[in-house]
Image (cartoon, rainbow, N blue to C red):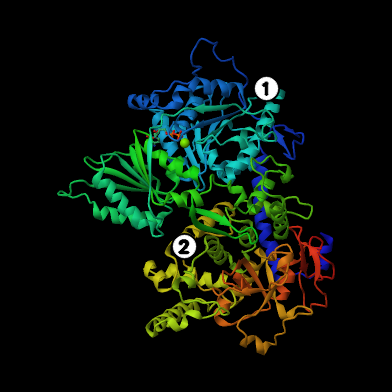
């Protein structure tokens, strides 16, 4: 606008807008295409906070003659020639017996909820019922795709394959799948399996889902964040499609929610979601009795216990498959090797074990082996993550060995940073796992934990993911669907209001929402990347100075996280202010070993700090680049105290992000080249600013620079003290002190020992951080990591045009004030002049 010219434009801002323009043009083109088609445009009434801008009338076949009169048992529009053995297997599935009542309920209602035990045939059969009733086929009353969503990619692919097979000749072309970056959909697709995220993305392109005649949301009991949102959004879509149907004679959409448990009251008894409660159909499954055996003790080293248990079952117990639940790929591969070695396929080995892995990242072909033939004379043993808990039913299982744990995505509400943690599953999950052994006959479940631990530590049910996860990405996605009043959105379980407000404010800071709360063009583009909004923002402004390939590498590594083996795992780190009580008891030998370990550790870490000594992000960049040049990556990781798996994941994510950019942003990036030359000095400088732009609300200033600071540090004394205090700058993101009673606590934050800054005793004036962590030691110091230094001038430039308050030098003399923070608690904040003298509006 006109006043833009009055403000100083820094180099960074200029580059930013140039880059943003490239994305803008591209995004605009995309949007135009989505609105397309030359069909007449109609405005829709504003329904419960939803604001579809322009809605074209769905192109659908005109109404056809009504279905055949009653008396004919099944209204079958499409004939399916299933292979005989498939037909026979189908008949034994409990769901098949319910076909008629299911289809009657679907015909009479817009939304139907089906509950049935895992293995009762919901996923494989219900889409086929719809297909045979004419959904998904041209020239029936209900053309338009049958969409089936899954929370897991593995399930989407394998179920599409299975249903294709079941449909007999020509079935393969009728059933396709689509997961994040790959899909098989074609012109003759009738049933499309996909992850719930894929359908959410389709919804932001066409809110009416005009291509679909029916949508099945599967595994709703898992309560994944996407499934929950999908159900909320779909309730609105159903309403819109119904209104259209009444006005223009098009077909309403059918929604089927499927769950493996009866815990569905969040969907069925939620008036805001469905004013008329959808009918609940229960499918009775034939479950055989399962004997549960707890361990006497709960061992931390459970993989060893599991190995012993599997050996014992295999050697001593009658035939029947073994299903082992583990937490992740590493555990699975490790146990796999061990078991294959113990029970190999050799001539003189009497009872070989047919061991198969099953986890999300396994290639599809390998995953499908669990449904294949078991070699003569051997016993099947599947080592799985919780994929096998409800999404996939493996035939022939009689024994389940359960570690009782799973790897879960967690996040800290204060910092918004995610992590993967191993924790106990819920009692409901443990029951599902045990149930897998009772499909074909009486089964046994061996729990590698004690009943005491089970009773005391296992939660009844898993908390819905929406309460455990950061939601700024979700808010952004919903805004892209024109859902403006998110607080009014009919969530099955609503996120708490402070989290919502915090997310909205963050999106505003990042420029994804304008101060009025409307989605900006930048926000629209940010939504294209499968990354948290912070990282999308960094990526989008990352094109200047040819920085994009480096930024992709940094964003990938930061997203994956935990690339370095933490120092405390080497048992060489100790907090500087902790009492070294154990010191005397240690032998001299242990001391020297420890010192040697520490020396090695620091050597490795320092080697990566040469690009810039004040940024952990750039240290990560060095690591990622070096890794790609190395032939023996295992050795490289061992030598440098890196986690191989994190490095492999980072590589994959780099590839994925690059792919999206190459495919969608012509001329921005030509291809993915894993091997990068070292960045120039100018680039290093730019990289740090670009990174800071994603963390503009997470800035800390060295405490001695504050007005009236009790911390007085001259440049000389800085070098000598062990711990230099910092203060977080923005009230909304600052560490929330345990308010009143905790006033005596140290309000400062400190550099985390894992940071490159800690090992070099460098204390820049300003830092951006992505995480605040409370130390477990009695001092309870709050530490920041990973860190990147930024200058006051750059901060000012980056915060320009946002409602942020930021410091500019000189700081002026503003005393701290006691104000309500974003959580409504009274706390001390520093109110500082905004660039240009104004006071930022949202913090004060
Ligand atoms: O969805 P739900 O858990 O109710 O059952 P399903 O996944 O539809 O599985 C029904 C049956 O099909 C099970 O007995 C599976 O073992 C079998 N199935 C199979 O044999 N091969 C596949 N690729 C998928 C399922
Ligand atoms: Mg299923």
Q: Is residue 726 above or below residue 69?
A: below
Nearest to the observer: residue 286 or residue 26: 286
Q: Quadrant of residue 331?
A: bottom left
Assess disc 1: are there few (<14), some (14-19) or many (≥20) residues with their C-alpha within 10 Å of its C-alpha: some
**What number of labels is visible?**
2
Viewer-nearest of discs 2 and 1: 2
Give coordinates of residue 111: x percent, y percent: 61, 29
In this rendering, would 312 be left or right of 96?
left
The residue wearing badge 2 is 646
User: The C terminus appears in which quarter of the rendering?
Assistant: bottom right
Q: Is residue 8 above or below residue 85?
A: below
The residue depicted at 70 percent of the width and 59 percent of the height is 510
Q: Marks 2 and 1, Cα distance to the nearest angstrom?
A: 53 Å
Nearest to the observer: residue 262 or residue 32: 262
Q: First in sequence: mark 2 or mark 1? A: 1
The residue wearing badge 1 is 249
The residue depicted at 49 percent of the width and 16 percent of the height is 74
Q: Quadrant of residue 579?
A: bottom right
Give coordinates of residue 750: x percent, y percent: 63, 74
Q: Farthest residue toward the bottom?
A: 716
Assess disc 2: are there few (<14), some (14-19) or many (≥20) residues with their C-alpha within 10 Å of its C-alpha: some
Give coordinates of residue 383: x percent, y percent: 36, 49
The residue depicted at 45 percent of the width and 82 percent of the height is 599
Q: Is residue 77 above or below residue 33?
A: above
Does residue 468 appear in this view? yes
Does residue 57 appear in this view? no
Q: Quadrant of residue 790?
A: bottom right
Give coordinates of residue 337: x percent, y percent: 30, 56
Q: Are marks 2 and 1 in contact (CB under 8 Å)?
A: no
């Amino acid at each position: 606008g006109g006043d833009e010219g009055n403000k100083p434009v820094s180099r960074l801002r200029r580059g930013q807008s140039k880059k943003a323009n490239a994305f803008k043009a591209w995004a605009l083109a995309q949007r135009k295409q989505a609105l397309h088609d030359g069909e007449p445009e109609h405005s829709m009434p504003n329904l419960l906070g939803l604001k579809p801008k322009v809605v074209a009338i769905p192109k659908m076949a005109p109404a056809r003659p009504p279905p055949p009169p009653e008396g004919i048992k099944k209204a079958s529009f499409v004939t399916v020639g299933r292979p005989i053995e498939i037909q026979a297997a189908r008949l034994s599935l409990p769901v098949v017996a319910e076909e008629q009542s299911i289809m009657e309920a679907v015909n009479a209602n817009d939304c139907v909820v089906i509950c049935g035990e895992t293995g009762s045939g919901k996923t494989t059969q219900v889409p086929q019922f719809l297909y045979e009733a004419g959904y998904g086929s041209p020239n029936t009353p209900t053309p338009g795709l049958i969409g089936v969503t899954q929370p897991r990619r593995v399930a989407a692919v394998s179920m599409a394959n299975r249903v294709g097979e079941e449909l007999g000749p020509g079935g393969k072309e009728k059933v396709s799948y689509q997961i994040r970056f790959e899909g098989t959909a074609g012109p003759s697709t009738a049933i499309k399996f996909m992850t719930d995220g894929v359908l959410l993305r389709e919804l932001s392109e066409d809110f009416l889902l005009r291509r679909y005649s029916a949508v099945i949301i599967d595994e709703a009991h898992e309560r994944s964040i996407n499934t929950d949102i999908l159900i909320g959004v779909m309730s609105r879509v159903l309403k819109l499609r119904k209104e259209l149907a009444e006005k223009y004679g098009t077909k309403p959409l059918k929604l089927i929610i499927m769950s493996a448990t009866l815990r569905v009251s969040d969907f069925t008894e939620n008036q805001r979601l469905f004013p008329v409660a959808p009918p609940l159909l229960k499918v009775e499954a034939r479950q055989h009795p399962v004997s549960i055996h707890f361990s006497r003790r709960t061992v931390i080293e459970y993989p060893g216990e599991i190995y012993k248990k599997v050996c014992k079952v295999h050697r001593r117990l009658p035939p029947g498959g073994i299903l082992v639940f583990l937490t992740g790929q590493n555990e699975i591969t490790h146990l796999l090797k061990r078991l294959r070695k113990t029970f190999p396929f050799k001539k003189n080995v009497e009872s070989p074990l047919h061991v198969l892995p099953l986890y999300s990242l396994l290639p599809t072909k390998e995953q499908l082996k669990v449904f294949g033939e078991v070699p003569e004379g051997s016993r099947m043993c599947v080592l799985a993550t919780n994929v096998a808990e409800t999404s996939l039913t493996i035939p022939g299982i009689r024994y389940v060995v359960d570690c009782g744990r799973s790897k879960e995505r967690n996040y800290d509400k204060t910092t918004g940073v995610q992590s993967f943690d191993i924790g106990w599953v819920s009692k409901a999950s443990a029951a599902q796992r045990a149930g897998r052994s009772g499909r074909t006959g009486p089964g046994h479940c061996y729990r590698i934990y004690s009943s005491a631990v089970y009773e005391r530590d296992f939660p009844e049910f898993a908390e819905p993911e929406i309460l455990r996860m950061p939601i700024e990405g979700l808010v952004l996605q919903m805004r892209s669907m024109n859902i403006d009043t998110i607080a009014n959105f009919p969530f099955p379980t609503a996120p708490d209001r402070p989290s919502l407000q915090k997310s909205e404010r963050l999106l505003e800071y990042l420029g994804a929402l304008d101060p009025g709360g409307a989605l900006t063009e930048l926000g629209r583009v940010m939504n294209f990347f499968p990354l948290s909004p912070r990282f999308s923002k960094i990526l989008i402004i990352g094109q200047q100075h040819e920085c994009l390939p480096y930024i992709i590498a940094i964003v990938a590594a930061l997203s994956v996280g935990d690339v370095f083996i933490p120092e405390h795992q080497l048992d060489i780190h100790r907090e500087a202010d902790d009492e070294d009580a154990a010191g005397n008891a240690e032998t001299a030998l242990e001391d020297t070993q420890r010192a040697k370990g520490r020396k090695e550790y620091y050597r490795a870490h320092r080697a990566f700090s040469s690009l810039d000594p004040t940024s952990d992000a750039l240290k990560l960049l060095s690591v990622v680049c070096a890794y790609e040049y190395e032939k023996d990556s295992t050795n490289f990781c061992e030598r440098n105290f890196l986690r191989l798996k994190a490095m492999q994941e980072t590589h994959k994510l780099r590839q994925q992000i690059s792919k999206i950019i190459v495919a969608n942003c012509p001329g921005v990036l030509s291809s993915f080249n894993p091997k990068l030359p070292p960045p120039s000095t100018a680039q290093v400088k730019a990289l740090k600013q670009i990174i800071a732009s994603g963390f503009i609300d997470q800035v800390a200033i060295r405490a001695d620079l504050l007005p009236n600071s009790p911390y007085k540090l001259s440049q000389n004394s800085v070098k000598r003290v062990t711990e230099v205090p910092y203060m977080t700058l923005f009230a909304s993101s600052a560490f929330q002190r345990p308010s009143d009673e905790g006033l005596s606590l140290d309000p400062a934050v400190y550099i985390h020992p894992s940071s490159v800054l800690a090992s070099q005793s460098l204390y820049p004036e300003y830092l951006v951080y992505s995480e605040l962590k409370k130390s477990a030691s009695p001092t309870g110091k709050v530490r920041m990591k990973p860190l990147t230094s930024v200058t006051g001038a750059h901060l000012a430039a980056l915060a320009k045009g946002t409602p942020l308050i930021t410091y500019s030098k000189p700081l002026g003399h503003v005393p701290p004030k006691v104000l309500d923070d974003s959580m409504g608690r009274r706390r001390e904040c520093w109110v500082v002049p905004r660039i240009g003298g104004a006071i930022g509006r949202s913090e004060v």
